[in-house]
């Protein structure tokens, strides 16, 4: 029997790989063969058995022989993860300052990391029965306009690393450009794979249907968190074995194994959902760009409102700018955007007279309307007008939101729930009033105003069950809804043919946010939701597409840019502001967060962290409480680190992390590189 040492990465906060002994029969294949880098191995760790990833092989170990443990099993039936995939995981670990195992192992399906091979064997057997023959001939290829054709030809014909920013107004046919570019790539590379990413799960069914209709002979795999573990395992394996030619997924798909990857498409690239907000806080968009550079393949980032970082790269020549200035349907035009001054047209039940009149007109003509309010629940808070009591959450620095249909108060941060009190807990007053409006309250008001209307609300509360969101969107597409009320779930990607009116309620709060990205996000949100209107040609006798924004600040320059659909000048002005203020993309940041039962403890740890390493050329700001200071009885504080050079920041962070990991503290802390929320 021959022997070797397996260097194994484990899903643990310890920043190290671990040595294990493995005995095998030299010259024998199958289960008795010498393991390979990239295979999975079951090993003992502490008092349990865990799955690890082999990242190296050696003949000898520095661990004393009496302390060296034996690996328990190697998953020989699974082809090793490629060197390119390991390099991707290694880059993510280095850049985001996390141990390799914390990046690589969570990126794999849970059924691959269990102790038994039952699920793996079943998935391999199921895929083995499928024919690995693909007919990549596209069906029903519509004629493109000249701008679309030029973009599709550039993307489809690109060789090597060629990043492109596809900037197209809403309804300009970006999806059709993606599909026709994919057809060209599959024609040229019959064995190649294409990764298409969307920011949210509820956008996958519509795009999946388009892909299946266009390429019925091509195997499609989908990867997102709503899949069952068995489904995710099967789809991941189809991608890993190269059988799935097109892989459609949300941000987790960027860490999937795609050995024959030839093109990456990032739809709605500006969307903050591409940034993971817990655990490994990675940007799937940024990792996708690095992966394209690593594999020397083209990547396209598409959006009607590109992120300022991507726009900056396009203006500077790092990305090729491909513009679609017109809507794809010839007779479809961009909607007219109008501002309703709420100081003059006083709203009743949250709706101004002009918006109610527009809704009545659409109802009379059999057209659909969308009311957008990015606040779910019935009301953000209830209060007592006698003594001033408000429904605070007892565990968070937040309010308990009223959910009237369920007769509950619910905290949207820690999920604490309680029944609506019959009287004020402080003074006993029984007249408790809801303050503000959520989607449930708007729905109630519309039902009273339009009793004959078919009204549908789509938000996180109404679509909790699996498949309920898609069922709701299908109802809208079939024309069985007159008025749709929704949050950001309805704001992007959906193609509602009969929708001619969009009403936007209460957007003003974002104008006064302390977050420097708030105006960029509000503009993107308004442009995206406005783009749901008028996507089909205007019917004879029908209404022109219209967007009505209720605001108290009609002179604000952001609203002026929305009215004129003027992303170019708005982005240029924001970039000038960022440059003068020294903010991203002209500066690079990292954020250290600390959590403790007491705020003073978290601040004290951050003060120690601030002073523990010399940092010439690095700006470390003073620690401060986070805006949402307390969540689930835990106080939170943050420390912002800034540098004009990304490489210099990375060098500092590596040394800093080594020092912080050596500190003995009960404070829970984490580092986020390129933070989106500060």
Image (cartoon, helix red, strand yellow):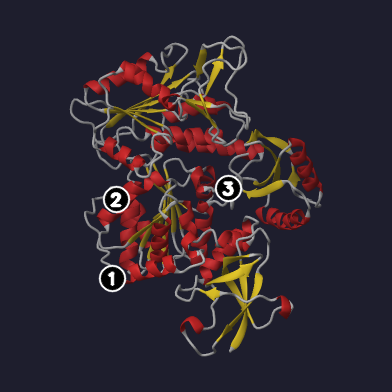
Q: Observer-nearest residue: 416 or 150?
A: 416
| Circle 2 residues within 10 Å: few <14, some 14–19, many ≥20 | few
- Any part of residue 108 in sight: yes
Q: Which of the numbered marks, if any, corresponds to residue 532?
A: none
Residue 320's spot in the image, x, y percent?
46, 53
Residue 295's spot in the image, x, y percent?
49, 66
| Residue placed under numbered mark 2 in the picture | 209
| Residue placed under numbered mark 1 in the picture | 131
Relative to residue 561, is residue 56 drawn left or right? Answer: right
* Closer to the eye: label 1 or 2: 1
Distance, label 1 to label 3, CA atoms, is 39 Å
For the residues bearing labels 1 and 2, Cβ distance under 8 angstroms: no
Marks 1 and 2, the one that precedes in the sequence = 1
| Residue placed under numbered mark 3 in the picture | 278
Q: Residue at x 37, y 21 (%)?
A: 444
Marks 2 and 3, the one that precedes in the sequence = 2
Quick one: SS at disc 1? loop
Quick one: SS at disc 2? helix
- Any part of residue 158 in sight: no
Residue 2's spot in the image, x, y percent?
59, 88
């Amino acid at each position: 029997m021959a022997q070797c040492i397996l260097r194994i990465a484990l899903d643990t906060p310890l920043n190290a790989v671990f040595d294990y002994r493995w005995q095998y029969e030299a010259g024998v294949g199958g289960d008795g063969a010498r393991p390979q880098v990239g295979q999975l191995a079951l090993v003992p760790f502490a008092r349990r058995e865990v799955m690890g990833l082999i990242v190296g092989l050696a003949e000898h170990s520095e661990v004393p022989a009496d302390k060296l443990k034996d690996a328990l099993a190697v998953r020989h039936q699974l082809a090793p993860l490629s060197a390119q995939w390991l390099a991707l995981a290694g880059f993510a670990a280095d850049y985001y300052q996390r141990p390799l195992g914390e990046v690589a192992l969570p990126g794999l399906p849970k059924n691959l990391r269990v102790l038994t091979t039952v699920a793996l064997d079943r998935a391999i057997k199921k895929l083995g029965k499928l024919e690995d023959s693909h007919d990549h001939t596209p069906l029903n290829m519509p004629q493109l306009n000249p701008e679309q054709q030029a973009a599709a030809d550039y993307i489809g014909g690109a060789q090597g690393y060629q990043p492109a920013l596809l900037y197209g107004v809403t309804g300009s046919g970006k999806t059709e450009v993606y599909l026709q570019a994919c057809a060209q790539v599959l024609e040229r590379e019959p064995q190649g794979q294409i990764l298409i990413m969307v920011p949210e799960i509820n956008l996958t069914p519509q795009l999946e249907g388009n892909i299946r209709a266009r390429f019925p002979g091509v195997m499609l795999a989908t990867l997102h968190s709503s899949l069952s573990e068995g489904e995710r395992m099967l789809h991941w394996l189809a991608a890993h074995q190269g059988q799935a030619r097109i892989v459609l997924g949300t941000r987790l798909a960027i860490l999937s194994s795609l050995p024959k990857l030839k093109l990456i498409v990032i739809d709605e690239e500006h969307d903050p959902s591409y940034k993971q907000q817990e655990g490994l806080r990675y940007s799937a968009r940024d990792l996708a760009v690095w992966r394209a550079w690593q594999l020397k393949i083209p990547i396209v980032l598409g959006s009607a409102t590109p992120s300022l970082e991507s726009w900056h790269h396009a203006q500077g020549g790092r990305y090729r700018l491909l513009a679609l200035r017109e809507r794809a349907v010839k007779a479809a035009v961009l909607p007219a955007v109008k501002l309703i001054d709420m100081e003059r047209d006083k709203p009743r039940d949250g709706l101004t007279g002009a918006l109610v009149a527009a809704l009545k007109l659409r109802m009379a003509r059999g057209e659909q309307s969308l009311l957008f309010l990015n606040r779910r629940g019935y009301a953000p808070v209830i209060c007592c007008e006698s003594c001033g009591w408000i429904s605070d959450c007892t565990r968070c620095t937040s309010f308990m939101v009223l959910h009237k249909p369920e007769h509950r108060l619910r905290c949207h941060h820690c999920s604490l729930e309680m029944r609506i009190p019959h009287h004020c807990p402080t003074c006993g007053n029984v007249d408790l009033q809801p303050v503000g409006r959520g989607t449930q309250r708007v729905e109630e008001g519309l039902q009273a105003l339009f009793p004959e209307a078919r009204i549908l609300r789509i938000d996180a509360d109404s679509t909790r069950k699996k498949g309920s969101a898609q069922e709701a969107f299908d109802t809208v597409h079939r024309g069985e809804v007159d008025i749709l009320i929704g949050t950001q779930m309805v704001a992007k990607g959906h193609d509602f043919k009969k929708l001619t009116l969009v009403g936007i309620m209460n957007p003003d709060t974002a104008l006064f946010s302390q977050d420097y990205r708030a105006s960029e996000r509000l503009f993107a949100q308004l442009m995206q939701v406005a783009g749901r209107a008028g996507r089909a040609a205007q019917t004879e006798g029908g209404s022109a597409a219209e967007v009505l924004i209720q605001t108290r600040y009609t002179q604000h320059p952001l609203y002026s840019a929305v009215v004129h659909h003027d992303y170019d000048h708005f982005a240029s002005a924001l970039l000038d502001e960022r440059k003068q203020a020294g903010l991203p993309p002209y500066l690079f940041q990292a954020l250290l967060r600390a959590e403790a039962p007491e705020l003073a403890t978290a601040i004290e740890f951050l003060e120690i962290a601030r002073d523990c390493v010399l940092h010439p050329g690095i700006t470390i700001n003073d620690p401060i409480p986070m805006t949402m200071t307390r969540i689930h009885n835990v106080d939170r504080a943050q420390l912002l680190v800034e540098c004009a050079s990304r490489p210099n920041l990375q060098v500092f962070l590596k040394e800093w992390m080594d020092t912080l990991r050596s500190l003995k503290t009960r404070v829970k802390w984490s580092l986020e590189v390129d933070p989106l929320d500060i």
